């Protein structure tokens, strides 16, 4: 089975991806390749950050890999927090504080439209391929549910009453920004599977 490193320090994202890709590819974590670096993310777009993270691994380890950069874009906040989603309330990257800040910024606002967007950068033998996924929804006025991570308790996708944090993993992954970007990644990898296999 083809081995791919998922360049993320976020254990929730790793678990989601293991769930989505199970049986298809052997997913290696940064831990598995003994990479303990805090990989820099200094770009000002999701695309730039995703590329930065995957090339960081490719250049140092020479292993096929991918990374995702994802974020929540809120219409009335000019698509913020966007690329700043992880650190919205500060460097501590605390999800609960991020959600509190978002609820505060949207207090009394009627337009609560938002979307999650995810960009995956895949590097195969030094060549990069990008995949994007998005999901539209709205920001709830209070937290609902215990599952998921990040902004999941306050994000409800279009057509659903539940928040992402109230859904089971399969339901969320089937429609989420990351799930959709990963579906494109898997379709691409499956299509090119034979040539990948020849090279590994
Ligand atoms: P890595 O860079 O190490 O992969 P990270 O947590 O920093 O992990 P991002 O830079 O992609 O990940 O930041 C995305 C942030 O956006 C993340 O920390 C969450 O706050 C939020 N986010 C992304 N996907 C989400 C999801 O499916 N549900 C809830 N929040 C999400």
Image: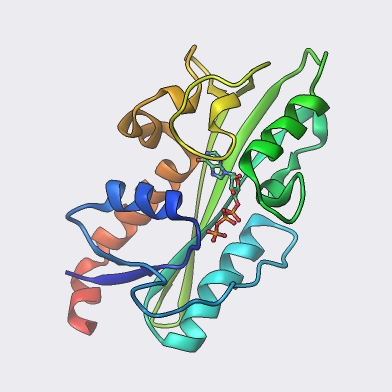
Q: Is residue 121 visible?
A: no
Position of the C terminus by quadrant: bottom left
Q: Is residue 198 visible?
A: yes
Q: Nearer the viewer, residue 148 or 188?
A: 148
Residue at 38% over, 37% down:
173
Residue 102 percent across, percent down from the top left: 74, 31
Residue at 38% over, 82% down:
125
Above or below 46: residue 109 = above
Residue at 64% over, 37% down:
96
Residue 185, image quadrant: bottom left
Q: Nearer the viewer, residue 37 or 18?
A: 37
Residue 22 percent across, percent down from the top left: 22, 52
Residue 21 as seen in the image, left or right of residue 79: left
Position of the N terminus by quadrant: bottom left
Residue 52 percent across, percent down from the top left: 61, 72
Q: Nearer the viewer, residue 95 or 184?
A: 95
Residue 33 percent across, percent down from the top left: 36, 79
Above or below 119: residue 123 = below
Above or below 195: residue 153 = above
Residue 121 as seen in the image, left or right of residue 192: right
Residue 144, image quadrant: top right
Above or below 195: residue 81 = above
Residue 141, image quadrant: top right
> Colour scheme in the image?
rainbow
Q: How many marks?
A: 0
């Amino acid at each position: 089975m083809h081995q791919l490193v998922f360049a993320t320090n976020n254990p929730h994202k790793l678990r989601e991806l293991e769930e989505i890709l199970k049986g298809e590819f052997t997913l290696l974590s940064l831990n598995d390749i003994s990479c303990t670096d805090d990989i820099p993310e200094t770009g000002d777009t999701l695309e730039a950050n995703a590329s930065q993270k995957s090339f960081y691994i490719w250049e140092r380890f020479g292993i096929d890999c991918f990374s995702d950069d994802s974020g929540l874009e809120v219409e009335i906040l000019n698509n913020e927090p966007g690329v700043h989603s992880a650190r919205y309330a500060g460097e501590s990257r605390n999800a609960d504080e991020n959600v509190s800040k978002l609820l505060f910024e949207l207090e009394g606002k009627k337009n609560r439209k938002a979307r999650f967007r995810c960009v995956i950068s895949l590097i195969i033998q030094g060549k990069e391929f990008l995949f994007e996924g998005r999901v539209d929804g709205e920001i709830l006025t209070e937290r609902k549910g215990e599952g998921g991570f990040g902004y999941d308790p306050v994000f409800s996708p279009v057509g659903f009453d539940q928040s992402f944090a109230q859904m089971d993993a399969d339901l969320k992954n089937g429609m989420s920004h990351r799930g959709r970007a990963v579906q494109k990644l898997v379709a691409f990898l499956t299509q090119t599977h034979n040539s990948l296999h020849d090279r590994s």
